[in-house]
Amino acid sequence: MFDHRHYVPVVKWKRGERVALRNLTSDVREKITPLIELLPKHFEGCTPDSPDVLRSILQRKAVEFQKYCDRVAPSNLGLVWGWYT
């Protein structure tokens, strides 16, 4: 359950932010739910009618999430993305 001390940072999925998430201390990790924002460049070559390309992109991002967010509880991780034109 979240309370007024729980923090939900919106984090663009860039190198510096990934490293920062990986280096969080355990007491901080317990008090945050990072909301990961994938960037338009992550979806290059993807169109609404190319579900296989989208699936491939999201699978690669899932591997990155495991690498950089392995210390963040899965229930404390959000993801936001959309089609950018």
Image (tube, rainbow, N blue to C red):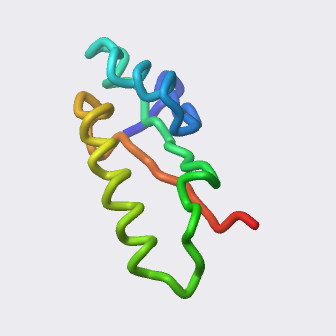
Q: Is residue 64 above or below residue 46?
A: above
**Residue 80 appears left or right of 78:** right
Q: Is residue 59 above or below residue 51?
A: above
Tally of numbered tags: 0
Which residue is nearer to you in this view: 43 or 80?
A: 43
Q: Residue at the location (50% across, 43% down)?
A: 36
Q: Quadrant of residue 81?
A: bottom right
Q: Residue at the location (32% across, 42% down)?
A: 64
Query: Residue extending furthest bottom?
Result: 49
Q: Is residue 37 above or below residue 84?
A: above
Location of residue 19 in the rendering, given as x and y in whole percent from the top left corner: 40, 21
**Residue 61 appears left or right of 10:** left
Location of residue 31 in the rendering, given as x and y in whole percent from the top left corner: 39, 24
Location of residue 85 in the rendering, given as x and y in whole percent from the top left corner: 76, 67
Q: Residue at the location (56% across, 68% down)?
A: 45
Location of residue 5 in the rendering, given as x and y in whole percent from the top left corner: 49, 22
Which residue is nearer to you in this view: 2 or 8?
A: 8
Q: Quadrant of residue 18?
A: top left
Q: Residue at the location (53% across, 33% down)?
A: 14
**Residue 58 appears left or right of 8:** left
Q: Quadrant of residue 27?
A: top left
Query: Residue extending furthest right?
Result: 85
Q: Is residue 7 above or below residue 35?
A: above
